Image (tube, helix red, strand yellow):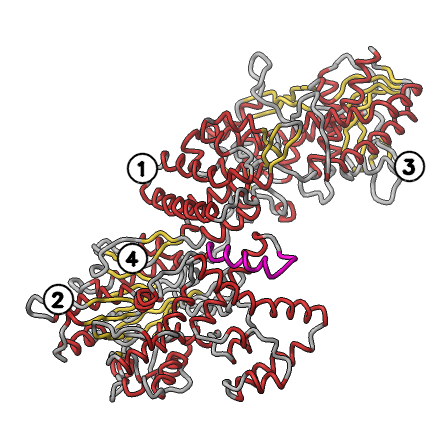
Amino acid sequence: MHSFLRNTAKEILDSGADLQQMCIVLPNRRAGLFFIQHLGSLISEPTWMPEVKTIEDVFYELAGSRPADDLSLIFELYKVYKTLNAEADSFDKFYFWGEMILKDFNDVDQFLVDARKLYHHLSEIKELESDLSFLTESQIQLIKQFWSSFIRQDRDHQEKFLKFWQLLSPLYTGFQGSLAVSGLAYSGMLYRQVAEKLDVIDRPSKDHYFIGFNAFTGAEETLIKHYLREFGAKIFWDLDAYYLEDQAQEAGLFFRDYQKDPVFGPTFPDTIPSQIEDRKAKIKTYATPLKTNQSNLVGSILEKVPAGEAWEETVVILPDEQMLFPVLHTLPDHVDKVNVTMGYPVKNAPVYSFLEAVLEMQRFIKQEDGKLSFYHTPVKNLLRSIYLKKVNEAFSEKLIADMQSLNQIYIPQEKLHEGGPLYQLIFQRLSNDSLFQYLADLMEALADRLQDEPLQRSYLYQCFKQLTRLREIFDEQDIQSIDREFFIRLFRQVFREVKLPFEGEPLQGLQVMGVLESRNLDFKRVIICNMNEDSFPPAAGLNSMIPFNIRKAFGLPVQEQNDSIYAYTFYRLLHSAEEVHLIYTTASDQGKAGEKSRYLQQMSVELGREIEEEVVFIPIDQKSTEAIIIEKTPEVMSLLDRYLWDQNGLSQTSFSPSALSVYLDCRLKFYLQYLANIQEKEEVSEEIDAAVFGNLAHLSMEKLYQNFAQRKKRTLLEKSDFEELKKNWVFPAVEQAIREQYHLDGEADTKLNGQMAIARDVLQQYLLQVLEVDEASAPFRLISLEKEKRYTAGLPINTTTGKRTVSLRGIIDRVDEHQGSVRLIDYKSGLDNKDFPDIPSLFDRDHKSRNKAAMQTMFYGLIYQATHPENTLPLKPAIFNLREIFGDDFNPYLQKKQPYRPGIEVEDYREYELDYREGLTTLLEEIYNPTISFDQTEDLKKCAYCPYQEICGR
């Protein structure tokens, strides 16, 4: 197999040069390891190996220093910025664009640009002529284009930009001086120092060989040319005629310039290699629907590798680091060794997510009367994490269940602290000066609990190292306190760049690496994942304070250069490849369409040969979802038996009117909800939805009249009672209802705000209007209120096992005696209709406007009469629709009404009892008929808001 590093090592050996007197300079350390391996395989007797360095090593050794970390540099930059700007922002605001300025300064020095001229106000043509004589006419035109377009901007925008732009030159100069005093430097500064003093450096003691470079910065180019001219250094180019000779091929952009250079040009080989064209590698592309499918595809490709073939000749390139673990998990069993040469981002680790969630929780802490409480969403996220569940799983689960059942939006600190020491450590309010120590303590506490999780401990160790370094930097800057919001932003910014380095034997096994780690390495089989635009090559965009035109005019890198570097990295993988597998996804990701990489498009046109493409399908069953039918087996019938009276007239449970309405709507829903007992998932709700509002309305009315009866020691309400009720007792009733709904202490100050405050005010208006309606109909005597009494009845039906009695039960919102009738009042927060054509329609599931409310209030008549068989008064069903009570013609009573005919008010349930009992009996006998299964409704409109629709597949 062709190998650039092996061929170069052989050429150097064949030249007869003394290896001990050599210094090999390569783009990265990994290439150095492979070079030494190839060199070792070529020599036949013991000898001293050459010194191997990276280009960075050369510069830093010549400079006698190494760069400081970015955070320390940004602090120094901020100090200078404050001296130049009387209205300087705080450090936390400066930090995020200070990063960009530092990167620009690094580029300016790496490419040896005159900062004074770069940052000058270039709006005058005379200045262009006098100060930019070193630029070409085309470069000057680029600058003119920028300033001419800039002048067309609004004046405010111009002034802001110019004020900032004019600050950058003195900021750059002052920053250099400040770093010189403090003994710090950034990499570009060191590179520039070396490049500008090459004429005074001593001749190196060893012969330098520069191997495998593609693109140089200005400083690198200056140094290498100096070594070539003055010290007899040699350079070996890793290139191919495929992209060098094609002027449109971006991969050869730098090489074409270097080939024309008077110093670099003579170093190019007389015959340019043509490996890509000559080798005719078998190239195959794969289109997968989802990113996760790629790992399975990689595994299937590796399954086909012939037995006995060296795994070192196969590489899997992962442009997206998140693919690492999925790929490792799908490797075939016969892949015995794997070398991973890439860091895995800590941001993808559960530990990082947990630490971030702990900090995020600090944003949502409430303090009232000296007590802390924590917002439910971040609390639930933390309680569901493996770290807290592992410590006290029962406590976490119970607390989550309580939060949902009690609808707690804020959870008291003392309740959370009952979980134990780790809970106490996590759920506390942090002061600005305790952030570093707190996170350090938390990481140590987690590490103690992760003794059996080496990978998680490794992630935690990397985070702890970074935290310690950050703390040291802040201590050096003598910053006593740091704003919490800034700390959270800084935590995310810095820690998301931390990577867990993998250690392994780099020269053995299947090679798994990132894009840039593959430079200078050759493989027989190449598998590349994520061959999508914005992944390989990565998304375009340079974060810079320097406008594009000015960057380009002064020779600073722009996106064109970045594209060229990635294009070269891709095409050089084809130098030695005999088999290439390129995988891309067709699904959109984060709002971006799944577009294949431009490299795939280019190859299909440029190579002039067939490229096989395979579309990987995920089998999808196109058949309609099968109907779900629950047969009434003996086990199912035993569940129904719970609703039957035993010999003592008792039952385990009872049918409510709601359950019977559900059965009429959908038999399967009835089974799932009432027999299988599959309940809707409870969530903490901050919204005052219709259900919550309805509950509050019912509770408020109940409390209002209940409290009246207790205060007055009577149940008769006269007209004279209502003025006091309206004036003094509506507000307390609503407050009491809210406390009960949200499980607040009886004496707790509700301190309502937002939606709840609005809901309270609306409820008061409703209650006041109900009192107006009741006052108009007074006097009346209260018989029972909602939860005071549960009414029950037994209804005999015929079953396959003989005559049985079904248990019926209901809660009537209000029962009172009014003008010689017993009113059965149901409060409704919606707009339930009070008209119904006849009794059979109430039990007709196919009736388009079956009146559920009428069926329910009639049900109340049945169970009331059964509970009070001695009653001789008429039973009058009534529905108080809260939305209707403000109307002048409000009438709460049921109306038997045919279309286009006047309605007949229901004066006494007992007049309809015979028909109602017959309809209810028929319905219950159907429920107990073993031949009628629990099936799905045919009316799909009823499925729209059904909580079980995912089970049904509707």
Asked which secondary structure carries label 4, the reply is strand
Labels 1 and 2: the sequence-earlier one: 2
Kindly identify the amino acid type of the residue bearing the numbered disc 1: Asp
Residue 75 is a magenta residue: yes
Q: Residue 805 vs residue 498: left or right?
A: right
For marks 2 and 3, give the CA distance: 107 Å
For marks 4 and 2, give the CA distance: 29 Å
Q: Mark 3 Cα within 10 Å, few/some/many (few <14, many 20+)? A: few
Q: Which residues are magenta?
A: 71-88
Mark whose residue sits in front, 3 or 1: 1
Q: Mark 2 Cα within 10 Å, few/some/many (few <14, many 20+)? A: few
According to the picture, the residue beneath numbered tag 4 turns out to be 340
Q: Quadrant of the N terminus?
A: bottom left
Asked which secondary structure carries label 1, the reply is loop
- Front-most of 171 and 542? 171
According to the picture, the residue beneath numbered tag 1 turns out to be 452
Give the residue furthest to the left: 45
- Front-most of 131 and 910? 131
